[in-house]
Image (cartoon, rainbow, N blue to C red):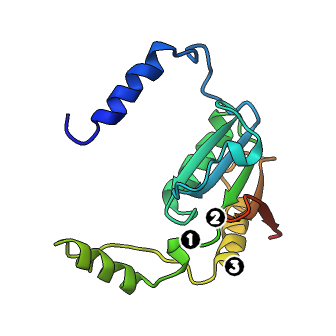
Amino acid sequence: MGGIDDILAANEVYASSFQHEQMVGRAAKGLAILTCMDCRIDPLALGGLSLGDVKVVRNAGAQLDETSTHDLVLASHLLDVNRILILPHTRCAMTTATDTQIRAVIEMKSSVKASDLEIRTINDQKQTLIDSVRQLRSNPHLKEGCSVHGGIYDVDTGRIKIIDA
């Protein structure tokens, strides 16, 4: 199978004692989190949540874009989500370099030509978060009554700092 043999072996162990077959696909706590794909973020643990409590949408930089907006709107209507937390984090790679710098790193580490790759770095994380919260709150497709909040997760302390939009 190539590069995922360890995952498949671990999956066999997981499946042998699988106990979630009765779980429904709705957010038991009514929450969706848009956060970064950074592996230092455990969306369940950081909020005292369990499997089935929350819908999690992840991308580079926790950016509200067309895809994440689409997913959050659907979650609000179809998956019992009535509150959303947009949660970027400290020391995010998307905030520490420019698009040009990231393209240069990609090209240096591989034979890939990255000039046409959309990177979408973030110049001002706090303002971008405020803008995203406001944008999602004003989205006409979001379920009425669904609240939208913003915070920054500190990867060094594990704390969330709420950013008032």
Q: Residue 35: image x %, image y %?
A: 60, 56
Say which residue appears at 58% left-offset and 63% top-offset.
64
Say if mark 1 contacts mark 2, CB within 8 Å. Answer: yes
Q: Residue furthest left?
A: 111
Among the two numbered marks 1 and 3 on one chain, the one whose residue lies closer to the N terminus: 1
Name the amino acid, label 1: Cys
Say which residue appears at 20% left-offset and 76% top-offset.
113
Among the two numbered marks 3 and 2 on one chain, the one whose residue lies closer to the N terminus: 2
Q: Is residue 98 above or below residue 126?
A: below
> What whole-number distance in Å separates the C-alpha atoms at marks 3 and 2?
12 Å
Name the amino acid, label 3: Gln
Name the amino acid, label 2: Pro
Res. 158 image quadrant = bottom right
- Please indicate whether residue 9 sits to the left or right of residue 121 in the image: left
Q: Secondary structure at mark 1?
A: loop
Q: Is residue 98 above or below residue 45?
A: below
Q: Is residue 58 above or below residue 60?
A: above
**Between marks 3 and 2 in the image, the one whose residue lies nearer the viewer:** 2
Q: Which residue is mark 1?
A: 92
Q: What numbered label is drawn on residue 88?
A: 2
Q: Which residue is mark 3?
A: 127
Circle 1 crowding by C-alpha within 10 Å: few under 14, some 14–19, many from 20: many
Circle 3 crowding by C-alpha within 10 Å: few under 14, some 14–19, many from 20: few
